[in-house]
Image (tube, rainbow, N blue to C red):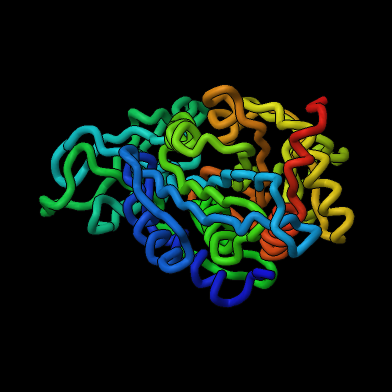
Amino acid sequence: MPTIGNAQLKLLEKLCNACAVSGDEGEVRSIVMEEIKGHTDEVRVDAVGNVLVTKKGNGKSPSTSLRTSQPHLRVMLTAHMDEVGFMLVADDGEGLFRFETVGGMDVRQLPGKAVVVGREHLPGVIGARPIHLTTAEERKQKISLDALRIDIGPGTTKVKPGDWATFATRFQRSGPSVLAKALDDRLGVATLIELIKHAPPEIDLLAAFTVQEEIGLRGSRVAAYTFNPDIGIVLDSTPANDLPDWEGEENIAYNTKLGLGPAIYVADGSTISDPRLVRWLAETGTASKIPYQFRQPGGGGTDAGAIHKTRSGIPSISVSVPHRYTHSAISIARIDDWKNTLALLQAALANLTPDLLASERA
């Protein structure tokens, strides 16, 4: 059984420190290709930049060592390689660049954040007018994106409009937690790499490391059309809105909570999960004594939003590692939640049979 140890934490650190804003996923793609080398039956990069991996099963039933005439399932697992960030759009001179956000971000959090820019990771900062030079009325207003600039200082010709930038945050471990940028979804990428290395032999594992999830689930649509699987499972990282209620009341709108294990999706803003898959994962967790939680239904979405609508429809579900402060300069997650996510998926895939899809969906 795979687990999370020092090697996996080192891999997560490498993935999180890489820069891969939507549309520029090359750094993470290179790490993935190196890590899965020798562990696949087939691997290729498609036209949009997805890494598509096939790991064939042996055709045996989970309950017997004998060959079975019943076909084993083609299971697609995805994790997106891209992260939120920025694109330079205009050069104002003296190392100052106007920029746009790539993916959903809160502009209020951006002033003063350190960034790296371009392929050479040039250091910069998101600058705004200092508080000393603003009026009382201005301080009551939300800072607009137009008022911000990425400042890399004068004298460089190594960046230009069209280049990407992202937060300069470096990975850290603090006791039971990890802190980094882009835990959404480098936790999923690292998990999928481990599942490829320890693929349950009873299924055909079709792994898609997807691109451009943060700007419209684009890569997963292409990958799902290519693979045409029986089942789609999305590995992601979901926001945990589990801070105390500042009014002193119980927080009942928490989405997920750190420390309670992997979050199984019932519904979100783009998908109603196949109820057979919800039951299968929950029953596996209960039987295997692996902690899990249900993500509260609500907004947001994952690659499942594109996968389940592909071709004639693909039964789909998402499983996420919870983390706080998503789409910001730094997020925090619990290592045990990551460990239990990997354990739940490995156990569930090992007991998966075609009988699951033979039952009624409702």
Q: Residue 133 in the image: x percent, y percent?
A: 36, 38
- Please tell me whether residue 322 is drawn above or below residue 17 in the rendered image: above
Residue sticking out furthest to the bottom: 6
Please name the residue shown 67% across and 65% down the image: 335
Q: Residue 209 in the image: x percent, y percent?
A: 46, 48
Q: Residue 115 in the image: x percent, y percent?
A: 35, 52
Please name the residue shown 65% across and 69% down the image: 2
Give the camera-side residue of 202 and 77: 202
Give the camera-side residue of 216 and 331: 216
Specify the quadrant that holds the C terminus.
top right
Q: Residue 142 in the image: x percent, y percent?
A: 48, 28
Residue 337 visible in this rendered orientation of the protein: no
- Please tell me whether residue 160 is drawn above or below residue 174 in the rendered image: above
- Please tell me whether residue 132 is drawn above or below residue 301 in the rendered image: below
Please name the residue shown 52% across and 43% down the image: 327
Residue 319 visible in this rendered orientation of the protein: yes
